[in-house]
Image (spheres, rainbow, N blue to C red):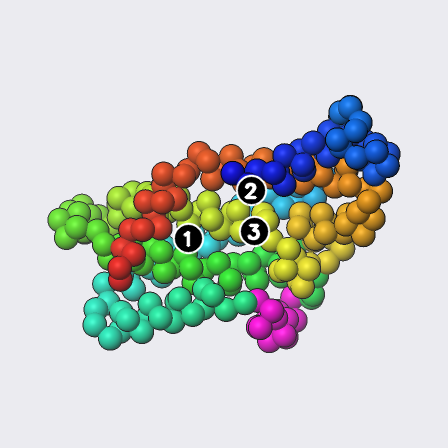
Amino acid sequence: MAWLVPLAVLVATSAHGRVDAAARGWWSAPPNGESYRDLVTGTELWRTLGFTLLLATAVTATVLVVALLAAYPLAWLTGPAAQATGLLLLAASVVPIQVIAGPVNEVLGLVLSSGTAQGLALVHIALGVPFAVLVLRNAFADLPVEQVRDARLGGRRWWHTLRRLARHNLSAVVAVSVLEFVQVWNDLVVGRLFGGPGSSPLGPFLAEQTRSFVSNSGALAASSVLASVLPVVLVVLSRRHLVAGLVSGGVR
């Protein structure tokens, strides 16, 4: 339970205004909610939250569609081809963005100008697809033969079959969607490297507030608490699907 201590300090600090949090500390001044009132009446945080919500939703939807289309045929590979595909997807999922930031920026510059929302979304999509394909591929491959046969017999087109199989793999679909959304919502590095003045998501916005950490600790804590509500609620509500979706086909 020790991890609850920093969370409690964060919430306690957020309940104080700038002066009390900086000069007196959360333990010696009574809470007054001034930081939250300042945030509610301001527009900068809400604008950033709105942009981040739109970005995370668009990226998650695109990643899910691309991953489903790719995972469906890859799930039926066997032998060395299946093993090589799994290793390739795993390697692509864990490569740090810092390692490939230079080449990615060069390629992105050929298509879009740097610092745009579209470019930021493309980078997130490219980084999220390998892991999503890996999870969904394993989940499809782990389905019982009877379910796959029934889906193929009942589907008039291949996308009808894919839709039926996706319903059977609802936990994996939910797990991929929630994890991708939370990853984009909480991102700092990709936003720092590929964002711009008009496309700055939540992570870089909060990081900028730490430049005046002592004098701004109350507002920073309140912003962090508000920013944490949505991902925490998503993870809590989907926790069963997350566990079931990530372990489906885990031995492949």
Circle number at residue 65: 1
1 vs 2, front mark: 2
Taking the spot 81% from the left edge, 42% from the top edge, the residue there is: 216
Q: Is residue 41 left or right of residue 163?
A: right
Q: Residue 74: in sight, yes or no?
A: yes
Identify residue type, mark 1: Val
Q: Position of residue 212 (x, y in %)?
A: 83, 48
Q: What is the quadrant of residue 129 in the picture?
A: bottom left
Name the residue at 66% across, 62% down: 194
Q: Which residues fall within the magenta stretch?
A: 97-112
Disc 1 and disc 2: Cα gap in Å?
36 Å
Q: Relative to 40, is 167 on the left or the right?
A: left
Q: Is residue 119 left or right of residue 171?
A: right
Which label number is shown at residue 3? 2
Give the x, y percent position of residue 201: 67, 50
Crowdedness near tag 2: few (<14), some (14–19) or many (≥20) residues, C-alpha within 10 Å: few
Q: What's the mark number on residue 184?
A: 3
Q: CA distance from mark 3 to mark 1?
A: 16 Å
